[in-house]
Amino acid sequence: MKHPGPAESVSPPPAATALFGDRLDRAEAYYSLLAGDGVEHGLIGPREVPRLWERHILNCAVIGELIEPGAAVVDIGSGAGLPGIPVAIARPDLRVTLVEPLLRRSEFLRRAVEELGIDVRVVRGRAEEKVVREAVGGADVVTSRAVAPLERLAKWSAPLIDAGGRLVAIKGSTAVDEIDRDRVAVERSGIGQLHVEECGGAVLDTPTTVIVGTKRAGAGASRARRERRSRRAKEKG
């Protein structure tokens, strides 16, 4: 099956211009990477190509409206770079790190970041691993998309989030049900104030549904401090 290359790319919808502005060329280049190498490497299904803009790139980029300027953002289970790369393109003020355990996917991410010319770090590993916590802990926001049920997602994300920081997880129609089912377990992880928000209503026909939670002050703080001190010591050494 032939997949669209750069010359065959579907023209970006008006929402793309609104979201990416003068960085639209980077978003178009990312589209081409997903439609080409992303499909060839099994990161994106061939049937998703016609709806890459609406269902994947724009659907992810709009969560930037929930993130404060200059925030440190960690995207866990990043896969093909969703939502981290669209957010980084739309919001160059953010400090974005992509966390992905699989070698093939992490190599794709490193290549994509280099080709797109965006200031994004790629860390290979699982969010629950100590080495990853030491590398990226203390984030203002941890994002994810279709990674795991909310209970597991919170357990992996909470150690990476600084006190007062937030979990921002893209979900679908199950968002409210997941909160009802997993609220107690998520709160045990140190994340409270769970609620659903919709992003992109001003530019998308179908807004993106997101679960948002806030890391309580003191929840896991001592471990996070130890890991930050360890990381800083290594950087100085």
Image: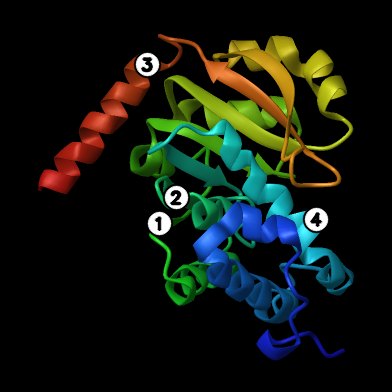
Q: Nearer the viewer, residue 177 or 93?
A: 93
For label 3, the residue is 221
Q: Are marks 3 and 4 in contact (CB under 8 Å)?
A: no
Q: Are marks 1 and 2 in contact (CB under 8 Å)?
A: yes
Q: What amino acid is labelled 4 in the image?
A: Arg
What is the spatial separation of the Cα atoms under label 4 and label 2, in whole angstroms?
22 Å
Pair 4/1: label in front: 4
Q: Position of residue 222 (x, y in %)?
A: 33, 16
Question: Which badge, 4 or 2, is on the more N-terminal residue?
Answer: 4
Residue visible at 73% across and 76% down? 35
Residue visible at 39% across and 34% down? 137
**Element marked by disc 2:** strand
Question: Which badge, 3 or 4, is on the more N-terminal residue?
Answer: 4
For label 4, the residue is 55
Pair 3/4: label in front: 4
Question: Which badge, 1 or 3, is on the more N-terminal residue?
Answer: 1
Q: What amino acid is labelled 1 in the image?
A: Arg
Q: Are marks 4 and 2 in contact (CB under 8 Å)?
A: no
